[in-house]
Amino acid sequence: MTSLWGTGSAAADRELLDAAESARIFRELIVPDQLAGSRQEQPVVVLVGGQPGDGKATITALVAALLRHRGRPVVLNPAAYEPYHPRFYQPITDEPPTPSADVEADGRRWYAMAEAHVIEQRYDVIVETELVDPDAFADSARRFKAAGFQVEVAILAVPEALSRLGVLERHLRALEAYGFARLAPQSVHDEGYAGVLRAAELIDAGDWADRIAVLRPDGQLLYGNQRTADGQWQRPVRTAEAITYERDRPWTVVESRNFLEAASQVARIGLAAPVQWIRDESVDGGKTVTAMARSRLHPDAVTLHIATAGTQ
């Protein structure tokens, strides 16, 4: 069965909230909480894309700060609407929580409603997407383009080990702080990781993006391009090439140290948890991402990390 964002299961569709209840939650809760913006003569949409755990929130904050000079922008993200679902919250138990297909499906439905709302209102918009479905990402961009928006794209170029660590750290810190959290499944991360390059190809080949930037999580520009007056790209199209280079390059001493310290901190957070599956998740996850990063780690950083491990 076809869902709003691609192919979904019939079982998931059957678990959707009643249409009237879904519309009420959107109208009474999501719109006032999440979708208040400033109407623009020439609205701009910035699509911030990358795999789960790559640091999109930092880029979104930077973009929002720039757009606030024009008025009040709106951030769209299906995950931001899931907490409004009555079945969203799951407290910590002795068993790890499982992803809720019905919650995610309603989140996507609310996203579609939110997209239509901001297009109608002509707000400046930031769309956060994990690029699990690059074709849906491109379709969304085309809808904004057809409505007269300037379409800009910021894609994060992040190695797999770093984003896997980001997913793990975010999950453990949320469990520590709030007592509940949803872990992005590895399959979703991996689909998003592959989807980044597919999205880059769609951007370079398509006619709907006015500007593209490939960024590191701290906002450093690695590659940029924009349309000329005749609609052609100003520079050679190398979006996918820039992403691949950044993902594959060796890390500096500082980058390696930061990664190793973050991995160690994740292990410490997990080991302090009162539930065994959280401890297992932190230890096993830390080992996995460290093994993935081994070929990129600077040897001096590894030596220093080993030498100081017992002092932290």
Image (tube, rainbow, N blue to C red):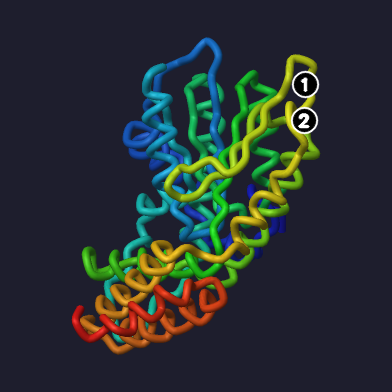
Residue 139 picture quarter: top right
From the viewer's perspective, is 285 left or right of 41?
left
- Look at the numbered disc 2 and give the secondary structure of its residue: loop
Residue at point 52% right, 19% down? 122
Residue 152: where, in percent of width, then height? 60, 31
Residue 231: where, in percent of width, then height? 77, 21
Residue at the farthest front position = 300
From the viewer's perspective, is 112 left or right of 254?
right
Residue at point 46% right, 49% down? 56
Q: Which mark, by number, is residue 231?
A: 1
Residue at point 66% right, 49% down? 242
Position above or below: 279 against 30: below
Residue at the farthest top position = 41
Residue situated in front as seen by the camera: 18 or 89? 89
Q: Is residue 100 visible?
A: no
Residue 215 picture quarter: top right
From the viewer's perspective, is 45 left or right of 179?
right
Residue situated in front as seen by the camera: 308 or 211? 308
Q: Which residue is mark 2?
A: 207
Callout 2 touching callout 1 (CB < 8 Å): yes
Residue at point 55% right, 57% down? 51
Residue situated in front as seen by the camera: 62 or 278? 62
Position above or below: 146 against 166: above
Residue type at tag 2: Asp
- Look at the numbered disc 1 and give the secondary structure of its residue: loop
Residue type at tag 1: Gly
Q: Residues within 10 Å of mark 1 (few under 14, many from 20)?
A: few
Alpha carbon separation for disc pair 2 and 1:
8 Å
Q: Which mark, by number, is residue 15?
A: none
